[in-house]
Image (tube, rainbow, N blue to C red):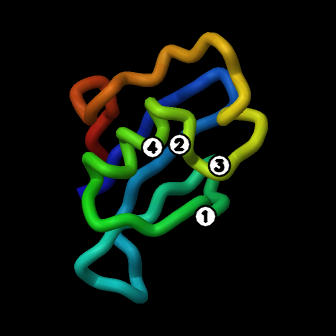
Amino acid sequence: MRYMFKSQVGTFSIEPDEVHVDMVQLCLGGIWLCTVETAEEAAARVSAQETGWHEWDILTDTDAPADLSCWEPL
């Protein structure tokens, strides 16, 4: 399953990883950020601001949900 979350720095997406079929990748605006085991882990990284995207990770006020509940399924 694919998910999308629109943030103040761009659109995050969680989608299946084509190389590692049992994992998902976290992207921002189509740019790969990381590969993790579950969509829940990817959403948690966004919420914790541990994405590897400096502009997002240093923000002091974000609206990222702590889980997939506010991500849009695609």
Q: Is residue 56 left or right of residue 35?
A: right
What distance separates the C-alpha of mark 2 from that of mark 1? Answer: 10 Å
Q: Earlier in the sequence, mark 2 or mark 4?
A: 2
Q: Kindly give the residue lying farthest to the bottom in the view shown.
A: 19
Residue indicated by mark 2: 12
Nearest to the eye among marks 1 and 4: give it.
Answer: 4
Gap between marks 2 and 3 measured at Cα: 6 Å
Q: Residue at x 23, y 57 (%)?
A: 1
Classify mark 4: residues with Cα within 10 Å, few (<14), some (14-19) or many (20+).
many
Hey, what amino acid is under mark 2?
Phe
Q: Earlier in the sequence, mark 2 or mark 3?
A: 2
Label 3 vs label 4: CA separation? 16 Å
Q: Which callout, 3 or 4, points at the residue further toward the start of the chain? A: 3
Circles 3, 4 touching at the beta carbon (< 8 Å) = no
Q: Is residue 51 above or below residue 67?
A: below
Reading the image, the residue beneath label 1 is: 32
Which mark lies nearer to you, 2 or 4?
Answer: 4
User: Which class describes the residues within 10 Å of circle 2: few (<14), some (14-19), or many (20+)?
Assistant: many
Circle 3 sits on which residue? 29
Q: Are marks 1 and 3 in contact (CB under 8 Å)?
A: no
Q: Nearer the viewer, residue 50 or 62?
A: 50
Earlier in the chain: of badge 1 and badge 4, it is: 1
Q: Amino acid at mark 1?
A: Trp
Mark 3 residue type: Gly
> Marks 2/4: CA distance?
11 Å
Q: Residue at x 70, y 47 (%)?
A: 53
